[in-house]
Image: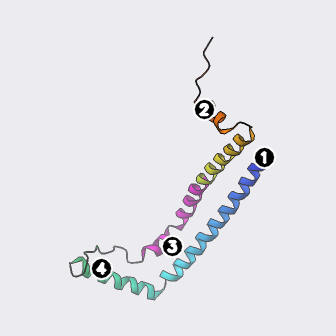
Amino acid sequence: MSRFQIVAALGWLLMAAAVVVAMVVARDLTLAAYGSQAARQEWETWRKVAQEQSQGGGPVQRRVPKSVEPPALVLMRDHFAVILPTLMVLLSCVYFTLAWMFAGVVRAKRSGLNRGQRMSMLFSEPPPEA
């Protein structure tokens, strides 16, 4: 493995650890904030207000939320096992694409060709066949 590959892998491990920790902390905070009886009562009160406004009794006409629990609670409690791996796959794709691009830039700089020479190599006509 090259030094760049080792650094890129360590960078990915740090990013992955940070994302996992941040998501677990966000999940814990969400469950604490919306999982209490007071938060559920507040959500039910808001649903009643939305029900009244859906009949034209408020400044806007709202649709009544179908969920009996706050959506953030349902998302983090019931779908966390899907969110975290999906997030890791997408972030990994972005990370390694950027690392690949960066490696190409560094490799081109080290080749000794200036920018104009590299561009002319990309857009030059192929040599004629003999």
x, y percent for residue 59: 25, 79
Nearest to N terminus: mark 3 or mark 1: 1
Say the numbered circle drawn on residue 50.
4
Residues shaded magenta: 66-92
Q: Which residue is mark 3?
A: 77
Q: Earlier in the sequence, mark 4 or mark 3?
A: 4
At a point 65% along the width and 62% down the height, the residue shown is 16
SS for callout 2: helix
Q: Which residue shows up at 71% across the image and 42% down it?
A: 109
Quarter of the rendering containing residue 84: bottom right
Q: Residue furthest bottom?
A: 38
Q: Badge 3, how many Cα within 10 Å: few under 14, some, many 20+?
A: some
**Residue 56 place in picture, x, y as percent:** 20, 78
- Sequence-wise first label, 1 or 4: 1
- Residue 78 appears left or right of 124: left
Marks 2 and 4, how far apart at CA:
60 Å
Tell me where residue 89 sits by quadrant: bottom right
